Image: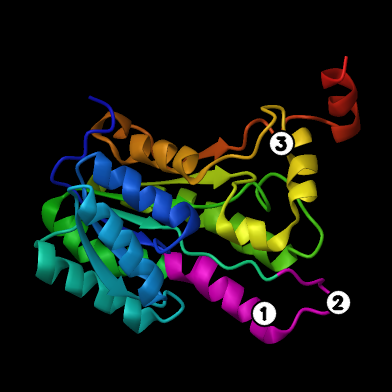
Amino acid sequence: MIGNLTGKIVIVTGAGQGIGEGIAKIFSVAGAKVVVATRTIKNGQQTVDTIKKNGGDALLIQTDVSDKNQIDRMIVKTIEHYGRIDIVIHNAGVFPMVSIENLTEQDLNSTLDVNLKAGFWIIKACLSEFRRRKVGRFIFTSSVTGPSVAMPLTAHYAASKAGLNGLIKTAALELARENITVNGVEPGYILTQAMLKLVSKEDLSNMAEMIPNGQLGAPEDIANAMLFLASDEASYINGQTIVVDGGSTLPESPVVLQQFYQK
C-alpha cells in the first residue's frame, strides 16, 4: 500500500509548526515513529503531544539546524532512542524578506545556514547509519521560488532553494548505488501561521485568485507528496523534485489568468 510507513523512523526538521508540523502528523498517521526536531521547545512539544494523543510515537529533540554540532547530536540521539533512522526530512527554513540593496551579511548567512548548508550536514551525519543498513531516504523541502520563479525581496531565499535543488541532484548521483535516494518537494503558496503573519486576509484572497486551483495549499498537501517519496513504491525515484503549487507556476501572465477564469 502506498504510504504505509509502519515502524519506520523519520526525522522532520522544523516540525514545530507550519509545513513541518503537517509532515510530522501525516507521517505518524502512516505508521512512522517521528522525531520532531525544532528550535522552539514549546512548538515542538505541542506537535509531539498531538501525535501521542492520536496514538502515535514521537520524540522531541531541540535542534538548531544552523549549527552543525546540533545536527550531529540530533542524529546520535535518534539512534540512541530508536535504534536506527530510515527517513530524514529537512524542512526547517527561514525567509527574512529584504532587498538585495539592504541585505546584510547576517541575513545572507542565516538563510544559507538553515536552508542550504544544513542539508549538507544532515546528509553527512546520516551516511554511516544509512550505509550500515544499506538503505535510506533523504527528502528536502525546496520551493518554487528560486528553482522556478522569482519574487522581490527574496533573492537570498531563492538562491538557497535553487542551491538546495543542486544538492538534491548531486547527492542523488553520489549515493544512488548505495540504495539511498535523495528527493525534494517544491511548495508554492501554502497557508501557514507564518503566512498569516506576513499578509492580510485581503492579500490572501488576491493570492488565491492568481492560483489556477483557486486556493492556497495546506501543509498536508506537501506532506502527502513527501509520504509518497518516502514509501517503498518510490524507490526508483531519485534526484527529483515534485512541484506542489496548485498550478501557480503555469500561467504566462496572471492578468490573462484572471480574465480567463472570469469568463
- Point out the stretch of residues depicted in magenta: 97-119
Residue 249: assigned label: 3
Q: Locate residue 235, reporting x and y percent.
A: 29, 34
Q: Quadrant of the C terminus?
A: top right
Is label 3 in a helix, a strand or a loop?
loop
The first of marks 2 and 3 along the sequence is 2
Residue 201: assigned label: none
**Corner quadrant of residue 102:** bottom right
Q: Compare residues 246 and 183 and report the one nearer the observer.
A: 246
Is label 1 in a helix, a strand or a loop?
helix
Q: Amino acid at mark 1?
A: Asp
Instruction: State the separation of the CA atoms marked 2 and 3.
Output: 27 Å
Instruction: State the separation of the CA atoms marked 2 and 1.
Output: 12 Å
Q: Is residue 40 left or right of residue 98?
A: left
Q: Are marks 2 and 3 in contact (CB under 8 Å)?
A: no
Is 145 situated above or below 251?
A: below
Instruction: State the separation of the CA atoms marked 3 and 1.
Output: 27 Å
The first of marks 2 and 1 along the sequence is 2
Q: Locate residue 6, reporting x and y percent.
A: 15, 40
Residue of label 1 = 107
Residue of label 2 = 101
Is label 2 in a helix, a strand or a loop?
loop
Q: Is residue 168 left or right of residue 128?
A: right
Is 33 situated above or below 108?
A: above
Q: Is residue 106 magenta?
A: yes
Which residue sits at x=74%, y=64%?
155
Q: Is residue 33 magenta?
A: no
| Mark 3, other Cα within 10 Å: few <14 / some 14–19 / many ≥20 | some
Q: Locate residue 205, reporting x and y percent.
A: 76, 41
